[in-house]
Image (tube, helix red, strand yellow):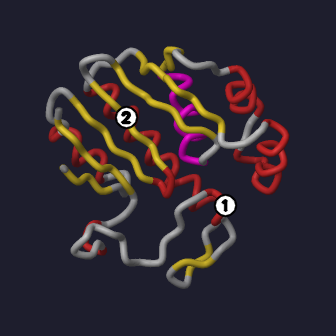
Amino acid sequence: MHKYRITKYNPLFRDAEGRFTRDEWTSISDIGKVFENQELTIEMYKKTEDSYIKAVHLTMDFLNLPHLHARNIIKSFHDNQFLALINDNIELYPKDMLQYYFSTNNNEKITHEDIDKHCRLQLREAWGSALFYPQKCKLFIGYDYLMSIHSHIPLDPIFQSIQNLGLFVEEF
């Protein structure tokens, strides 16, 4: 398997142990806070989130994946807690996303149409899940806007497209 870290974090700012050393936002809950003398706005947050989603689509298209499987979906909050937490940024949660959140089950095939909602909810730490396509791809989205992709073939041909989104690709 070919393994890649795809994130918003510039590797030039990692220390010898690989830790990121700059003051950087890591969560949707950081909207409105200041990092490197700049307030994180909803628009800035959404632009970065969109870049991650586009990187997932680029990978799925390159690998010719019709869908991904989702297993071990674990919600981070009880439903009432979730609804209370999203209230500050409710405009980021359209009706179709909320319907998806409340109706998705384990062991589902996540289509291209729904991968956006699924990954956004994972980036927003609403849930965790294992995303994969057998024998071809594993997609990991963790806390702090960390994403990695394991692929059965090299992803080099789409590196530039991913970097054009403002993300960084690191092989590991």
Q: Residue furthest bottom?
A: 37
Tell me the quadrant of the picture where the N terminus can be found: top left
Give yes or no for residue 43 being in the magenta stretch.
no
Q: Is residue 122 left or right of residue 16?
A: right
Hey, what amino acid is under mark 2?
Leu
Q: Could you tell me residue 166's position as x and y percent?
A: 37, 57
Q: Is residue 123 magenta?
A: yes
- Residue type at tag 1: Ser
Disc 1 packing (10 Å; few <14; some 14–19; many ≥20): some
Q: Would residue 35 be found to the left or right of residue 52 on screen?
A: right
The image shows residue 136, relative to residue 85, as above or below, that is: above
What is the x, y in percent for residue 169? 26, 52
Q: Which residue is mark 1?
A: 29
Q: Tell me where the magenta segment starts and ends, as one range.
A: 112-124
Q: Across the whole image, how many numbered discs are drawn on residues? A: 2
In the rendered image, which residue does mark 2 sit on? Answer: 139
Contact flag, marks 1 and 2 (Cβ < 8 Å): no
Q: Main secondary structure of the magenta part?
A: helix
Q: Residue at 29% of width from left, 27% of height from top?
A: 137
Looking at the picture, tell me which residue is in the foreground, 143 or 164.
Answer: 143
Q: Element at badge 2?
A: strand
Residue 97 to residue 26: above or below:
above
x, y percent for residue 125: 60, 47
Q: Residue at x 50, y 82 (%)?
A: 36
Position of residue 152 relative to residue 55, above or below, is: above
Question: Which residue is depicted at the point 37% across and 34% down?
Answer: 139
Task: Classify mark 1: helix, strand or loop.
Answer: helix
Residue 94 position within the rendered picture, expressed as x and y whole percent measured from the top left: 74, 36
Q: Earlier in the sequence, mark 1 or mark 2?
A: 1
